């Protein structure tokens, strides 16, 4: 992470903004305004997860700085809820939409509805399975992050043993991308045997439940690799209950505050920091350039490299999703 990037992320995460519901102040539609200003609707998945909370808060702060009103809403990964939020954005004459899509395929229709209403759409964190609709899709480099995570995981667990894997929401392309990134590294070590694989939908409680089931069927598991921090923390809770945490090494992905605390406590081996504050702010900046000047992003798909956080650098963490430089 460069010093400039770290500064942007740090500034974004220092802001505390209350999440609002779908309703917001009205603004001029994108079709009737060539100047910046008006309402931007920001849609995150679930703000109870600090990653998505940060995503919404940083985007709203950047928009406010640029002179916009904002409303933040949560889809909870449900396409129908997302559709209702977008319908409200249309009726409120939103000038732009910052959307973390609920479903790679299912959200395509919702994006089309916003575009039909002349609302420009910028996607963050997750992609949809169609290009040429959103003006930009800004995401973490999940393949790169998964690869460095798997490399760190192997350093900790060794090159042999039985392990389990926790997968994210199947409708989110990030789940498969991370799983494939892990496999690209782990497959080079035939002594590592995956004896269990469970889908826990990015959720801590479900991760705990799935890990309990894994332990019952595979008591000899010595390592767990997880698609995100919440599932990893759920696995750690199950391992604590079973009295096996000291025997099983767990790796995560996101760079959440709770994951950082778990690394410091010696419970989690590492996490992978996603620069969510950076691309959330950049999406708003690019939307503003489009609204104010008609400038489209040079590239629709934009990825941002992830950063390893482990025992050697965890003490540099001063704020959630931030590395001090």
Image (cartoon, helix red, strand yellow):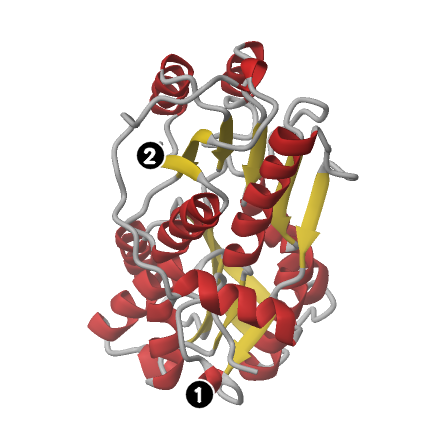
Q: Relative to residue 228, is residue 272 depicted above or below?
A: below
Q: At 54% across and 60% down in the image, what residue appears? A: 274
Q: Residues within 10 Å of mark 1 (few under 14, many from 20)?
A: some
| Any part of residue 75 in sight | yes
Q: Foreground residue, 72 or 191? A: 72
**Residue 164 in the image: x percent, y percent?**
47, 61
Q: In which quarter of the view is residue 68 placed?
A: top left
Provide residue 261's location: percent of width, then percent of height: 34, 77
Residue 46 appears left or right of 271:
left
Label located before the other in sequence (1 or 2): 2
Residue 197 located left or right of residue 34: left
Q: Which residue is mark 1?
A: 315
Residue at x 42%, y 36% (from the top left corner): 42
In this figure, which residue is indicated by the disc labeled 2? Answer: 73
> Disc 1 to disc 2, how far (Cα)?
33 Å
Q: Position of residue 95 (x, y in %)?
A: 50, 24
- As drawn, the residue found furthest toward the front would be 35
**What element does badge 2 sit on?**
strand
Instruction: Tell me the quarter of the image containing the C terminus.
Output: bottom right
Query: Which residue is farthest top?
Result: 116
Q: Residue at x 57, y 14 (%)?
A: 31
Q: Residue at x 51, y 12 (%)?
A: 113
CB atoms at circles 1 and 2 under 8 Å apart? Answer: no
In the image, residue 193 above or below residue 34: below
Any mark on residue 47, and which?
none
For label 1, the SS is helix
């Amino acid at each position: 992470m460069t010093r400039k990037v770290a500064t942007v992320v740090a500034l974004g995460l220092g802001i505390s903004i209350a999440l609002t519901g779908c309703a917001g102040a009205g603004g001029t539609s994108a079709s009737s305004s060539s100047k910046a200003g008006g309402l931007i609707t920001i849609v995150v998945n679930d703000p109870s997860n600090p990653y998505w909370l940060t995503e919404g808060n940083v985007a709203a702060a950047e928009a406010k700085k640029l002179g916009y009103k904002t409303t933040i809403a949560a889809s909870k990964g449900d396409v129908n809820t997302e559709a209702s939020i977008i319908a409200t954005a249309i009726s409120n004459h939103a000038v732009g939409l910052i959307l973390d899509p609920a479903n790679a395929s299912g959200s395509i229709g919702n994006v089309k509805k916003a575009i039909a209403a002349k609302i420009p759409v910028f996607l963050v964190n997750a992609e949809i399975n169609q290009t040429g609709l959103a003006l930009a899709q800004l995401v973490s480099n999940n393949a790169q992050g998964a690869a460095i995570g798997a490399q760190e995981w192997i350093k900790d667990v060794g090159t042999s043993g039985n392990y389990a894997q926790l997968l994210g929401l199947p409708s989110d392309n990030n789940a498969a991308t991370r799983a494939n990134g892990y496999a690209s590294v782990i497959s080079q070590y035939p002594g590592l045997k995956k004896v269990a694989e469970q889908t826990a939908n990015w959720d801590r409680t479900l991760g705990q439940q799935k890990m309990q089931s894994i332990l019952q069927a595979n008591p000899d598991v010595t390592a767990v690799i997880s698609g995100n921090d919440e599932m990893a923390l759920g696995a750690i809770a199950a391992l604590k209950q079973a009295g096996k945490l000291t025997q099983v090494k767990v790796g995560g992905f996101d760079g959440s505050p709770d994951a950082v605390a778990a690394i410091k406590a010696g419970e989690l081996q590492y996490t992978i920091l996603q620069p969510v504050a950076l691309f959330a702010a950049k999406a708003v900046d690019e939307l503003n350039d489009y609204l104010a000047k008609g400038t489209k992003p040079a590239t629709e798909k934009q990825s941002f490299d992830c950063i390893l956080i482990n025992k050697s650098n965890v003490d540099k963490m001063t704020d959630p999703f931030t590395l001090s430089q």
